[in-house]
Image (spheres, grey):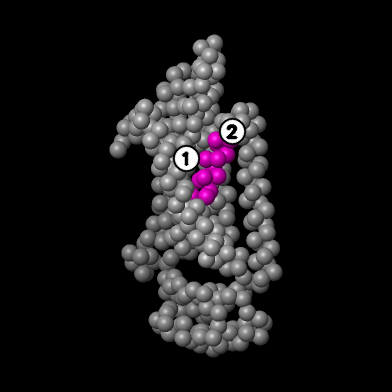
Amino acid sequence: MDLENLITKLTDDNSKRLMVIPLAVLAVALLVMGWNFATTGSPVNLGIEFTGGTLVTIPATESSDAVAKFLEGYPVIEIREVGSRYMVQMGSMDEEAYSELAKKVNVQYSDAEIRYMGPVYSKLLQKDAMRYVPISFVLMAIVVFAIFRKPFVSGIIVLCALSDILIAAGLSTAVGVKLSLGTVAALLMLIGYSVDTDILLSVRVIKRKGLLDEKVRGAIGTGVIMTASTLSAVIALMLVSTILYYISPSFTRIDILADISTVLFFGLLADMMNTWITNVQALKWYMARPRAAVRRRRR
């Protein structure tokens, strides 16, 4: 489907039926987060920065089963092969156990790397993330309300942005992405980007003169090209950080870039749905009200 056909599909009389798409995706994301909360106690998968523990990086000179057997007796959570090395994530342990582990690993592997993150520091990071992400969202909402000064229009923008974040978090959790400092940064970036496209649409519809459908079509044309350009960059990042590794093991998988690009990918797809389906339908209803129609005729 080319851009012109897409715009026609989003603005015709049957476009209300498309509302089921973003609502269904949001429902799936919420179900994933609900299930994860019921099974793990957290709506998303927490990385080592937020859970605390030990990360051991060793050469991949033997099978993962052999590594698991070598580390038997320690709280191994995950063994992941990254390029020519294994990354072994472990749970928290006392100082004596950690010293014993470090000695054992360094004797067995000459170029091993061991990183320990204590539970106190991890809890501080959790508190900071739980504090600053909502603060960023609230500040964004205040700016949006200050720009439009229309509760309905501003509220829809905020709800669309919230839906983008929830979908990105839920779908990323479904594919195994863990919440880390990098993915928190990606979610913060999505807050700004989500609001950007919604503001583009709302400004064109609310503050410009002309026929409603023509204003919506113009906003969709500009916005879809913007998002497609950003998606191209994100897909390129996914290709470099993840896909090339699965095509050829000679490439190294860059975990942090892979996780960030995955979150951004799901968030941008969610933004396209919520902006050009949900927000478009909400604004068309808002502008079609008798009071709004009278104001347009007076202009």
Using the image as rendered, state which of residue 75 and residue 255 is in the foreground: 75
Crowding at label 1, few (<14), some or many (≥20) Cα neighbours within 10 Å?
A: many
| Above or below, comparing residue 10 to residue 193 in the picture | above
Question: Where in the figure is residue 165, as x and y percent of width and height?
Answer: 53, 48
| Residue 232 vertical placement versus 204 (above, below) | below
> Is the residue 10 above or below the residue 239 in the image?
above
What's the residue at 31%, 36% (across, down)? 2
Q: CA distance from mark 2 to mark 1?
A: 14 Å
In the image, residue 194 sits, relative to residue 282, either above or below, namely below
Residue 43 in the image: state x and y as whole percent.
55, 59
161 magenta-colored: yes
> Left or right: where does residue 131 sit relative to residue 166?
right
Q: Which residue is mark 1?
A: 274
Tell me which amino acid carries mark 1: Asn
Whether 264 is among the magenta residues is no
Name the magenta segment's main secondary structure. Answer: helix
The local secondary structure at tag 1 comes to helix
Q: Nearer the viewer, residue 280 or 218?
A: 280
| Residue 208 visible to an observer of this rendering | no
Check residue 198 in the rendering and tell me which mark sits there, or answer none: none
Q: Position of residue 147 (x, y in %)?
A: 62, 30
Mark 2 nearby-residue class (10 Å; few <14, some 14–19, many ≥20): many
Disc 2, SS: helix
Please give the residue where the numbered disc 2 appears in the rendered image: 154
Provide residue 255's location: percent of width, then percent of height: 48, 64
Stretch in magenta: 155-168
Observer-nearest of 244 and 119 = 119
Residue drawn at point x = 37 percent, y = 60 percent: 243
* Quadrant (top left/top right/bottom left/bottom right) for the N terminus: top left
Q: Is residue 253 visible?
A: yes
| The quadrant where residue 174 appears | bottom left
Circle nearer the N terminus (2, 1): 2
